[in-house]
Image (cartoon, coloured by chain):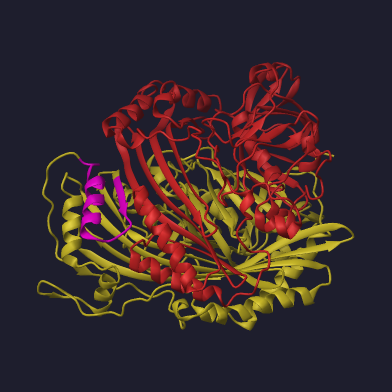
Chain colours: A yellow, B red
Amino acid sequence: MFIKRREFIKLSGITMAGSVFIPPLLQSCGRVPLSNDASGYLEHFEVTTAQLKKVILTAMSKGGDYADLFFEHTKSNTASLQDNKVNSALSNIKYGVGIRVLKGDQTGFAYAENTSLEAMIQAAKTAANIADSNASATDFPVREFHPPSFYSIVSPWEDVSIKDKMPFITSLNDKIFAGDNRVTKVNISLNDTTTYILFYNSEGLLTWDYRPLTFMSARTIMEENGRIENASVSKSYRKGFEFLTDDLVNALAKESIEQTSLLFKAGRPKGGEMEIVMGPGRSGILLHEAMGHSFEADFNRKNTSIFSDKMGKKIAEDFVTVVDDGTLPNDRGALNIDDEGNLTEKTILVNNGVLSSYIHDRISAKYYNVKPTGNGRRQDFRNMPIPRMRSTYMENGPHEKEEIIASVKKGIYVDNFSNGQVNIGPGDFTFFVKFGYLIENGKLTDAIKDINIIGNGPQALADITMVGNDLQFSDSTWNCGKNGQSVPVTLGMPTVKVKKLTVGGLSA
Amino acid sequence: MNTNEKYKIADLVIKHSLKCGADQIALAINDNSTRRIDIREQKIDRLQESIGNSLSVDLYVNKKFSSHSTNLLKEKEILKFIEDAVEATKYLAEDEFRYLPEKELYYQGKGEDLLTFDPSIPTIDSKKKIDLARAVENEIYGTDERIISITTSYYDSVNKILLADSNGFMGESDSSIVALAAEVSVKGETGRPSDYWDEYSIFFDKLIKTDIGKTALQRTLRKLNPRKITSGKYKLIVENSAAGTLMSPFISALMGTNLYQKNSFLDGMIDKKVASNILSFNDDPLILSGFGSRCFDMEGLNAVKRTIVEDGILRNYFINTYYGRKLKLQPTSGSTSNLIYKTGSRSLDELVKNVDKGILITRFNGGNCNGATGDFSYGIEGFFILNGELVHPVNEMNITGNMRDFWNTLAETGNDPYPYSSIQIPTMLFENADISGI
């Protein structure tokens, strides 16, 4: 299926060696001196500002309103452990430029996998075809924008050999095996990705970004009396080699053992509608699926979202404030600039129960006549930007966690999930619970696992009747999918009670 | 990239890898081109074209293994890429099971044409494609006041791959796909249901080009005003377009990697009953014009038709050479080709007519399956069936069960293998599924 119609989120459960960044050199365009940063990125992609202008003019040659060039060079390395040995490694290099032309809300897009002027001009001509007149574009002067730094790093991954990473991987393996004698297999992956971005548009904006991203994951298999259970854990940040520490290894080992062990005690609940208490942290998946995607402005601009006629209206209790934030330091969802060259920000989506902002890209911000929120994101240069979440979370509320659990007579408590999905039009969302507990008469009782929970977004938002004061962020490896594009995100939430959702389970 | 350029790169990569210290090397060079046009509100909403090339290399160095890919394909870049990759591989731990396939396993044929490629696709005029997508929109544009959004699309893709390795294997395969699609949203009392309809073909001339918009609209309108029903055990009909979701964990459990990693609920089940005797299917790579047809797999292994499940008895796993060695099993192939199911005699409508009380599932919404245990739970959309009639749409409900039990409740298959996928699964009727609603 080439059209990916369902928006989803999932945790990565998986599993070397790049080239060198050319040091910033002073480059000038005509009489305009460029900063060292700008010159460095231009040299990295082997282009000049004169060439960029030429490509933009070609892209705009058929009457487009706007055009942009998104250069990307990504180097990704994964080292994997299986059978107690780091015995495989993967690497991937991606390089190219995406060229986009807008005519109103219409988009023309093409890309080139090398940055020769000839290849870029060819792609620009293709993208230009979205418009159909002969118009000459205005040649704006180059305007540099130096982005902020939300993910400064100590040791770039490009300076690190696989041999320096291996001790952390084997140490994690050893600690998991040492932690529980039921462990029979462990699979570990360590990934590091380094991305160089250079952005230029028809308004003369020239900006750039350097994006580190890393995760470490472990899948632990335990056997007890012939029964097999497994659990995957991971942590991910925009950090350099300093990500790898003994503390990280210890935390992953502890979490691996705890989560896998718990599954032996768990069963399937009886299904049906019931009260749900969502624990702090990973329960942010509720926000991501039940509301976040439906707040993305492309769906609202097209009237397909169930929230398209609810801007400025009360959609939740006063103590519900939902945020999408691109500025959290070293967060997996953080961005110095979005993929349309805009600043990111802390965007309040629901302010004390009132829908206050959609999630915008350039097209939708223009449509709604608002400032872009810095949510225009793309998987890579091969894809066009669309409105996407970054780190989505709920602010603290007035309730204590204990008080929330104690208020439930019959329901479930959940805080560990693997994936979720939403069907935008009806607003029906789901998330898959890896582990949780029954709540009976205000107390956590039997452990439960492997059930799907389904609900309706607007209804679930309105049904949030209690919000805890214990906001936590999940630093697991969350990937969000939309229109066939995957981007890294994070999420967070305090403990929350939802009055009613439908829990999958057995009928007798 | 033309064929000669690909062969030249393959030769360069193999020679340079061996020179740098690799004992063996396998590579894939892929070139792909796609075109996509979306129409919305009688205008082109999106026009996208792409041409991409990539090189993937598996390296075997002193019994150590690594895998690398890049789209930087200038000679200088490739040489550096190989040098870095070979060097990094040397730091890894040894894995005695990593080496290229035994020579007798390779495809030895002469490149039979399985009719998986339409060379005319890249030459089709853009206007013709735009007109096709417009025609799909025009089928329904302005026909119903409840419509709030229609997006129609034309899409085509051409993919050419060259496989080569240092054992001397070399194989080329070409494939194409062309599609027309419509997605419709309508405004209802309680929501804005949407649905879609796609037509796919390998060949442009064989693509069905009409009634796509109408079908999408009809599928959407019938979803208006859904209701939940009471939790309980129900007969279940799963439409052919949705049934692949239920089959996916079953297939995953047959993969060598999951068997080895203790992540398969079908471990140790060869020649044992894994489903009701209604379930029979083969993996057949050699049918003409199948979406998964091939003469060889990505390792170059000779493609062979295999029985996977026969009257509910499991006959074969999907095993590549690496996991074959580790599991001491004969390699088959590490991936599926075309899954061809034994079909029944009745249509979807006839199956519905024979259900007193049950649910027709037309789409799944999220959910997952625990690969080790087979425990699954999925969100569902569809219709409540009463006395052989679709009474009303249902939503916000889940199906929950265990794959080992569930497939034993398969009572009947339809006569309608899904034609738009390599998984040609028919509509299926199950007894006693656990449905959670009110």
In the image, residue B287 above or below residue A503? above
**In-image side of B283 versus A291 (left or right):** right
Q: Position of residue A192 (x, y in %)?
A: 51, 71
Q: In this figure, what is the number of numbered marks?
A: 0
Q: Position of residue B400 (x, y in %)?
A: 74, 42
Given residues A356 and A185, the one toward you in this image is: A185
Residue beneath the point at 56% across and 80% down: A163
- Residue that lies at the very extreme toward the right in this rendered image: A225
**In-image side of B17 versus A436 (left or right):** left
**In-image side of A65 versus A169 (left or right):** left
The image quarter containing residue B411 is top right
In the image, residue B363 above or below residue B389? below
In the image, residue B151 above or below residue A318? above
Residue beneath the point at 25% across and 62% down: A200
The image quarter containing residue B96 is bottom right
In the image, residue B177 above or below residue B335? above
Residue B56 sits inside the magenta stretch: no
Given residues A346 and A219, the one toward you in this image is: A219
Residue beneath the point at 76% across and 42% down: B403
Residue beneath the point at 27% across and 58% down: A69
Q: Is residue B246 at least partly visible in the picture?
A: yes
Q: Position of residue B386 (x, y in %)?
A: 72, 20
Residue A110 sits inside the magenta stretch: yes
**In-image side of A462 versus A488 (left or right):** right
Quadrant that contains the C terminus of chain A = top right
Q: Which residues are magenta?
A: A108-131
Q: Position of residue B303 (x, y in %)?
A: 60, 41
The image quarter containing residue A33 is bottom left
Q: Is residue B438 at least partly visible in the picture?
A: no
Given residues A127 and A121, the one toward you in this image is: A121
Given residues A173 and B136, the one toward you in this image is: A173
